[in-house]
Image (cartoon, rainbow, N blue to C red):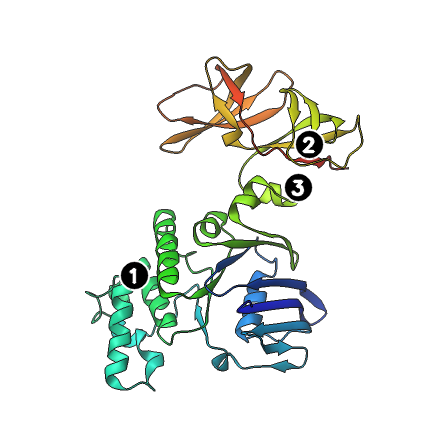
Amino acid sequence: MPLLKVDRISCRYGDQTVVSDLSFHVNRGEIVSLLGPSGCGKTTALRAIAGFEPIHGGKILIDQQTASDAGFIVPPESRRIGMVFQDYALFPHLTVRDNIGFGLRKLKPGERDEQVQHLLEATRLQSLGERYPHELSGGQQQRVALARALAPRPELLLMDEPFSNLDVDLRERLSHEVRDILKREGITGILVTHDQHEAFAVSDKIGVMHAGEILQWDTPYNLYHEPNSRQVADFIGQGRFITGRVVNPETFDTALGQLEANRSCTEGVGKSVDLLIRPDDIVPDQQGDIEATIIDKAFKGAETLYTLQLASGDTLLSLFPSHHEHQTGEQVRVRLEAEHLICFPQPE
């Protein structure tokens, strides 16, 4: 049975519905993300799970017990939930050790000290226990906030944009650390974020949200390679759409030749469709059968992302090893190596 079940919930602020008919479940030990742009309802959904917001329809169950439904709400402190906020919310007058132990005042002193020391070590803060928050870096403060939330041994940890105040490199490193800590401690987690790289690094499952609804609930791999809609395909990862003409439900005539899709197209024979091509589908190859012109480039360290234009006018993205240096306007040869080719109806 899932630890958390969100069953067709809706949330409103006045006359405005911000979450509509939202459903998903989280199994014990899983880490999931609600991913989407600002205003899509993901933080409201998280606050409803925490018990900070009422729901106006549906039901939230934690460990098979009703935590919220229309007209009923179990208070946050009775839900065995931990929360990590965007701004860390540390107590500035308490040391790291006392911040972590703040919610453990009901334990015997020996048990409290043992749990605090365990979390100091789990979060690699054991040498910083006597420091105050203003003496720590942003990443260290975030790890203190995480340790404090984990200290009471919650059933479920909720994280609301916890890395957004950090620089890109630290954000990526800390997201991997948080996943390792939660998996090691056996804690179920939900992350709310607008950053797909964070969601990919942390999550077993991701719900892509738009306008208060989940467009697709799936693994990071499937969201990237098997988006169920053009909207998800546009939001997740990078790529370009090229035009194809339907020969049969799995075959298309395109500027790259005749291509086979791995998912049947519902458009009729002869119809024009758009096919999603990811940068990793286009492989540099001096003997390749596709010739293209470089019209833009972005150096990314180990790789360079090139924007390529075909003779047809279609554009593609391709990742080259960065030691293969090419200039804008140069002709290059590539080949298509796409194991996941998805078609979408063309926008009206």
Q: Residue at x 39, y 54 (%)?
A: 175
Q: Which residue is mark 2?
A: 274
Residue 94 seen by the camera: no
Q: Looking at the image, tell me whether mark 2 or mark 3 is earlier in sequence order.
A: 3
Q: Which residue is mark 3?
A: 230
Q: Residue 7 in the image: x percent, y percent?
A: 65, 68
Q: Nearer the viewer, mark 2 or mark 1?
A: 2
Q: Is residue 13 left or right of residue 139?
A: right
Query: Which class describes the residues within 10 Å of circle 1: few (<14), some (14-19), or many (20+)?
Result: some
Q: Amino acid at mark 2?
A: Asp
Give the CA distance from mark 1 to mark 3: 39 Å
Q: Are marks 2 and 3 in contact (CB under 8 Å)?
A: yes
Q: Residue at x 58, y 44 (%)?
A: 235
Residue 140 is labelled as: 1
Q: Looking at the image, tell me whether mark 1 or mark 3 is earlier in sequence order.
A: 1
Q: Nearer the viewer, mark 1 or mark 3?
A: 3
Local secondary structure at mark 1? helix
Front residue of 304/204: it is 204
Q: Are marks 1 and 3 in contact (CB under 8 Å)?
A: no
Residue 221 sits above or below residue 3 on the image: above
Q: Looking at the image, tell me whether mark 2 or mark 1 is earlier in sequence order.
A: 1
